[in-house]
């Protein structure tokens, strides 16, 4: 009965929103990989969407009020601190969902232009609800690329979009996070529908004279980069004759949002 009721609500809302309308969600995008708490670098992010596609962007100069390149001292407690870099650029990181062609186009880590099929994410929807802004949201959870995520989505906007690469639910994701909120997307505001329709621009590799690569090529690039970082890190530790060689220091989860070394 719960499932049937949800389908009825989604169908009704889909009819109401059958005309293409543009929306803009503003999120906070917090990255705290390896810190065990949501204490890391905090970016402004936005998701612009309509019935056909969506574009999520963060670490972009214009979203932060200008270019940023700075080191940030982060103290977790009296015994643990981190120094991370907050860096923005003109284009930012971009994630474009093309529903019609079932493609996800990204300007991702290393400013690689990555083309892949829209990932199939197997969400489990629960009965739990909470309000975010003026929207009632349902809770969903999943395992995706090495992390366990919780998402809160609203069927009031029955479009399958969300922050970063998280998508595929029967409603717009307004908040999402992994275990310990080391990856944390939180809601700030929304304009929907907007007064005018804005053309959503997909990432343009030609603007940087680059070629599109496949997700498998991108994955291989990150794995190789991570292996080199491990080698350099171990050489540095050996140079200081340190006994601190814990293997968990070298997992991809401490550096990357997508984790491939536990597959």
Image (cartoon, rainbow, N blue to C red):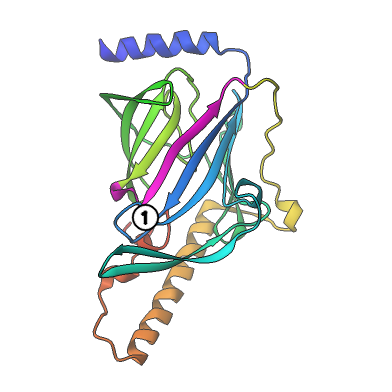
170 relative position to 109: left or right: left
Query: Residue 222: image x %, image y %?
Result: 48, 63
Q: Is residue 65 magenta?
A: no
From the viewer's perspective, is residue 7 above or below residue 44? above
Q: Is residue 190 magenta?
A: yes
Does residue 135 sit above or below 185 in this rendering? above
Front-most of 194 and 201? 194
- Give the quarter of the figure containing the C terminus: bottom left
The structure residue drawn at horizontal position 48% and vertical position 58%, both measured from the top left corner, is 219
Task: Locate the N terminus and report the quarter of the image it occupies.
Answer: top left
Q: Is residue 40 above or below residue 172?
A: below
Q: Disc 1 marks which residue? A: 39
Q: Report the number of discs.
A: 1
Q: Which residues are magenta?
A: 179-193
Secondary structure found at label 1: loop
Quarter of the rendering containing residue 95: top right
Q: Give coordinates of residue 143: x percent, y percent.
A: 32, 43
């Amino acid at each position: 009965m719960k499932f049937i009721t949800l389908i009825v609500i989604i169908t009704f809302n889909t009819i109401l929103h059958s005309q293409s309308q543009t929306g803009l969600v503003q999120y906070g995008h917090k990255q705290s990989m390896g810190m065990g708490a949501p204490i890391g670098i905090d970016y402004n992010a936005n998701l612009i969407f309509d019935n056909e596609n969506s574009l999520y962007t963060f670490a972009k100069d214009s979203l932060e009020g200008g270019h940023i390149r700075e080191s940030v001292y982060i103290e977790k407690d009296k015994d643990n601190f981190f120094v991370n870099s907050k860096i923005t650029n003109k284009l930012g990181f971009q994630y474009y969902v093309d529903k019609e062609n079932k493609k996800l186009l990204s300007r991702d880590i290393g400013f690689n232009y990555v083309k892949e099929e829209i990932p199939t994410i197997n969400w489990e929807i629960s009965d739990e609800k909470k309000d975010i802004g003026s929207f009632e949201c349902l809770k969903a959870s999943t395992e995706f690329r090495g992390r366990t995520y919780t998402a809160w989505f609203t069927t009031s906007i029955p479009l399958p979009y969300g922050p970063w690469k998280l998508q595929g639910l029967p409603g717009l994701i307004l908040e999402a996070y992994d275990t310990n909120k080391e990856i944390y997307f939180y809601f700030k505001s929304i304009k929907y529908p907007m007064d005018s329709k804005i053309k959503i621009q997909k990432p343009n590799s030609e603007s940087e004279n680059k070629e599109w690569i496949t997700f498998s090529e991108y994955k291989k690039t990150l794995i190789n980069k991570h292996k080199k970082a491990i080698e350099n890190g171990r050489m540095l530790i050996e140079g200081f004759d340190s006994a601190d060689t814990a293997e968990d220091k070298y997992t991809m989860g401490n550096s990357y949002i997508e984790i491939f070394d536990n597959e």
